[in-house]
Amino acid sequence: MKKRKSTLVPKTLLHIFIYVALTTLVMVVSLIKMDMVRKGYLDKAFLEVGEKALNAVLGKIDNNGILHGVSYGTPVFRTAEEYKNVPVCPMPYGQSMALMLLAEALNCKKYE
């Protein structure tokens, strides 16, 4: 029997995900974790994961409050190389997600 190659997460998608979406991923994961801990769905031990992600995002915010490391909007491309050519620049959606994350971090501090 021929072994079937998994197509669940093609290698190209992994490269794309790691390269383009890292800042977004960090913000979403930390926001979800912090929100779920605050609401009591997750144990407080998970808050540490959210705080690590928060610190990573804080390291991308400059003295003017601009979040760096966000990619320009991306259509669907065929290759990882095309995604690597997408400009990385401050974008409104990135700024908005960072504000949501910071607000949630403040909410979590209120309930500790």
Image (cartoon, rainbow, N blue to C red):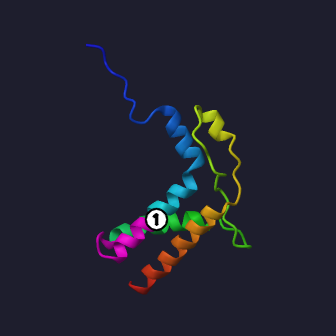
Identify whether 5 is placed above or below 84: above
> Residue lying furthest top in this view?
1
43 in magenta: yes
Q: Main secondary structure of the magenta part?
A: helix
Relative to 90, is 110 above or below?
A: below
Q: Residue at x 68, y 44 (%)?
A: 86
Left or right of 100: which side holds 59? right
Horizontal side of 35 relative to 97 (left or right) equals: left
Q: Position of residue 15 (x, y in %)?
A: 55, 38
Which residue is located at x 69 percent, y 51 percent?
88
Q: To which quarter of the image does residue 19 belong?
A: top right
Q: Is residue 81 above or below residue 41?
A: above
The answer to if 92 sits in the magenta stretch is no
Q: Residue furthest right?
A: 64
Asked which quadrant contains residue 35, the reply is bottom left
Q: Quadrant of the N terminus?
A: top left
Q: Nearer the viewer, residue 5 or 52?
A: 5
Residue 28 x, y percent position in the rendering: 48, 61
Residues shaded magenta: 31-44
Query: Which amino acid does the dot numbered 1 rest on?
Result: Ser
Local packing at callout 1 (Cα closer than 10 Å; few below 14, some 14-19, many 20+) is many
Q: Secondary structure at mark 1?
A: helix
Total residue callouts: 1
| Residue 32 to residue 80: above or below | below
Residue where numbered disc 1 is placed: 30
Residue sticking out furthest to the bottom: 110
Residue at the image point whose x is 69% and y is 72% from the top: 65
- The quadrant of the picture occupied by the C terminus is bottom left
Q: Is residue 40 left or right of residue 88?
A: left
List the single residue furthest toward the front: 75
Residue 95, percent across and down?
63, 67
